[in-house]
Image: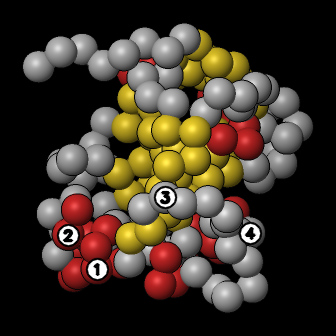
């Protein structure tokens, strides 16, 4: 198996600047999650990019508040301003080891490509993203990751 591509390091941070980071990207594609938890956490869909946890260096990590949002995942926010910082699967499986980071945190998100949407059947009818890309339902999303509906990773 070959090593993931290195697409350079990007910097970013929360709204107030108490948390900053540098992240070495291994992919340029990002997606939208329309599940209820992501919508409540971000105020809309989560537009997130997967970054290997080992590729992120935090500054101000004492300002990171982690919240176990389910039996299998945690979410992190800035303790000062509340900006969402990442979603992290804490159980073993295909999603372990990555942080799903909101693309809006990056100082420069240029060159990233919006490639997919998940939980499309949970998206409210009040908004829609234009463009042709895969749009998976909850059931299709769970099947893609080999997760039973009882283990839903939202």
| Quadrant housing residue 146 | bottom left
The answer to whether mark 3 and mark 4 are in CB contact below 8 A is no
Q: Is residue 74 left or right of residue 94?
A: right
Q: Is residue 72 left or right of residue 70?
A: left
The answer to whether mark 2 and mark 1 are in CB contact below 8 A is yes
Which quadrant: the N terminus? top left
Q: Residues within 10 Å of mark 4 (few under 14, many from 20)?
A: few
Residue at mark 3 to residue at mark 2: CA–CA distance: 18 Å
The answer to whether mark 1 and mark 4 are in CB contact below 8 A is no
Q: Which residue is mark 1?
A: 139
| Quadrant housing residue 112 | top right
Q: Residues within 10 Å of mark 1 (few under 14, many from 20)?
A: some
Residue at mark 1 to residue at mark 4: CA–CA distance: 23 Å
Residue at mark 3 to residue at mark 1: CA–CA distance: 17 Å
Residue at image location 55% in from the left, 72% down from the top:
34
Q: Which residue is mark 4?
A: 43
- The circle on residue 133 is 3
Residue at mark 3 to residue at mark 4: CA–CA distance: 22 Å
Disc 1 or disc 4, which is closer to the eye? 1
Disc 3 or disc 4, which is closer to the eye? 3
| Quadrant housing residue 4 | top left
Q: What kind of element bears circle 4?
A: loop
Q: Which residue is mark 2?
A: 143
């Amino acid at each position: 198996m070959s090593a993931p591509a290195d697409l350079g390091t990007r910097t970013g941070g929360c709204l107030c600047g108490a948390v900053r980071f540098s992240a070495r990207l291994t992919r340029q594609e990002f997606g939208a999650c329309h599940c209820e938890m992501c919508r409540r956490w971000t105020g809309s869909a989560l537009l997130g990019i997967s970054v290997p946890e080992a590729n992120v260096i935090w500054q101000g990590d004492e300002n990171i508040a982690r919240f176990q949002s389910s039996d299998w995942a945690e979410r992190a926010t800035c303790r000062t301003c509340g900006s969402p910082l990442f979603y992290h699967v804490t159980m073993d499986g295909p999603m372990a080891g990555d942080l799903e980071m909101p693309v809006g945190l990056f100082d420069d998100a240029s060159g990233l490509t919006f490639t997919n949407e998940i939980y499309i059947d949970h998206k409210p009818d009040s908004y829609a993203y234009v463009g042709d890309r895969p749009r998976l339902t909850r059931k299709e999303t769970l099947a893609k990751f080999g997760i039973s509906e009882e283990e839903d990773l939202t």
